[in-house]
Image (spheres, grey):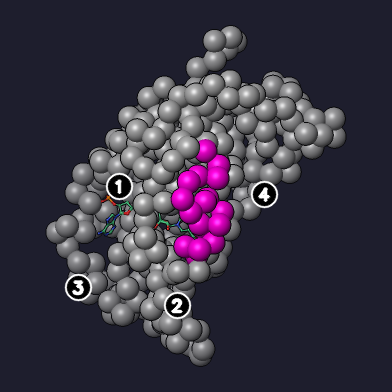
Amino acid sequence: MKAIVNTEYGPPDVLQLTEVEKPAPKDDEVLIRIYATSVNFGDIATRNFGNISHRDFFMPLPFYLIGGLSFGFSKPKNPILGNELSGEIESVGKDVRSFKSGDQVFGYSGQGMGSYAEYRCMPEDGFVGLKPVNMTYEEAAVVPYGALMALDLLRKVDIQSGQKVLINGASGGIGSAVVQLAKHYGAEVTGVCGTPRLGFVESLGADKVIDYTKEDFTQNGETYDLIVDVLGKSSFSQCKISLKEAGIYIMTSFKMRDFVDMLRTSFGGGKKAVCAILVAKPEDLVLTKELIESGKLKAVIDRSYTIEQTAEAHRYVESGQKKGNVVITVEHNNKT
Ligand SMILES: NC(=O)c1ccc[n+]([C@@H]2O[C@H](COP(=O)([O-])OP(=O)(O)OC[C@H]3O[C@@H](n4cnc5c(N)ncnc54)[C@H](OP(=O)(O)O)[C@@H]3O)[C@@H](O)[C@H]2O)c1
């Protein structure tokens, strides 16, 4: 089968179209004929992991070391990126009960990656589920990462209807899902992003948008029950003034000083800092499907590339211009 393989870390040019062996499903696995995959933060960061020093890494040193052991320090252990996919079940292992050949599915392969390919095997009880009926393969392939992360994040803070929520990084993979889900849970949502993406964040349902190049949200006198900082561009000390009395400041990218803030604020009442490790849960893929089918969660495709153009797709995402998601389509010669 064809796949995009990167045997070394580096710029998008390391992504090479290569013929590799087609996988065969184990007894408890399904074989998915991939029709679409995506380019998100995880693909870009993993493709370049070997060139990122632990100081520039978006997490404290222990997480960098865990990343290195998992991805490989000097060269990629797993040379096929792509952590989201959609497609059709081609065949199933002999013990598989919940899927059959021909089922239309979407899924999340996380750090196991491997979706920049024509086929991928996934365990039946892993992150694979029936595709939302109201989405194309292209749309379904760009939803799982953000939705799974956002669901876990909002569960961690026990979001309540009527709360005021600010999302710093609202236009990205995670932030755009948090905006939509926080609205679904009844929150009043403010999204912070750069100038070109203000309209995109508004279109996701944000009640208010703030352009971080023009306004510092910590200086406008507003206070929130919850501030989500996706990229770790602010800090608890800066944002404290913008939190209500029992408000939570939650970060998905953090450093040791943020850990210290979390420890300091973890006792007693008052404002809290939370460093979140987001854990995707397979059952949330079912919830994601339901949310999509009930119109609560949508996918916005900015650009679509073929698998042969994967390096170009990475270049576009890295240019910082995307407004929504970038999808990669996988053409099969004998697609029916
Ligand atoms: N804790 C965990 O378990 C976990 C799991 C997965 C990911 N993460 C973290 O999540 C982050 C990636 O999130 P993502 O996939 O949503 O990324 P993404 O799609 O690349 O989006 C990044 C967002 O950050 C915004 N941004 C850039 N510069 C900013 C600034 N100066 N101020 C405010 N916002 C700014 C961008 O806005 P504009 O484009 O509009 O400028 C965009 O909305 C990574 O840092 C990663 O470490 C953590």
Q: Secondary structure at mark 3?
A: helix
Left or right placement of residue 70 versus residue 216 in this view: right
Left or right placement of residue 6 versus residue 123 in this view: left
Q: Are marks 1 and 4 in contact (CB under 8 Å)?
A: no
Return the residue nearer the eye: 88 or 188.
Answer: 88
Look at the image and give the residue range highlighted in magenta: 63-79
Q: Amino acid at mark 1?
A: Glu
What residue did someone put label 4 on?
A: 283
Whole-number angstrom distance, CA of label 1 to CA of label 4: 29 Å
Return the residue nearer the eye: 70 or 151.
Answer: 70
Q: Nearer the viewer, mark 2 or mark 3?
A: 2
Going from the N terminus, do you reach mark 4 or mark 2 first?
Answer: 2
Q: Residue furthest front?
A: 74
Going from the N terminus, do you reach mark 3 or mark 1 first?
Answer: 1
What residue did someone put label 2 on?
A: 259
Q: Are marks 3 and 1 in contact (CB under 8 Å)?
A: no
Q: Amino acid at mark 4?
A: Glu
Q: Are marks 4 and 2 in contact (CB under 8 Å)?
A: no
| Mark 1 Cα shell of 10 Å, populated few (<14), some (14-19), many (≥20) | some
What residue did someone put label 3 on?
A: 219
Q: Residue at x 33, y 40 (%)?
A: 11
Whether the residue under disc 3 has CB within 8 Å of ligand 1: no
Q: Residue at x 50, y 17 (%)?
A: 331
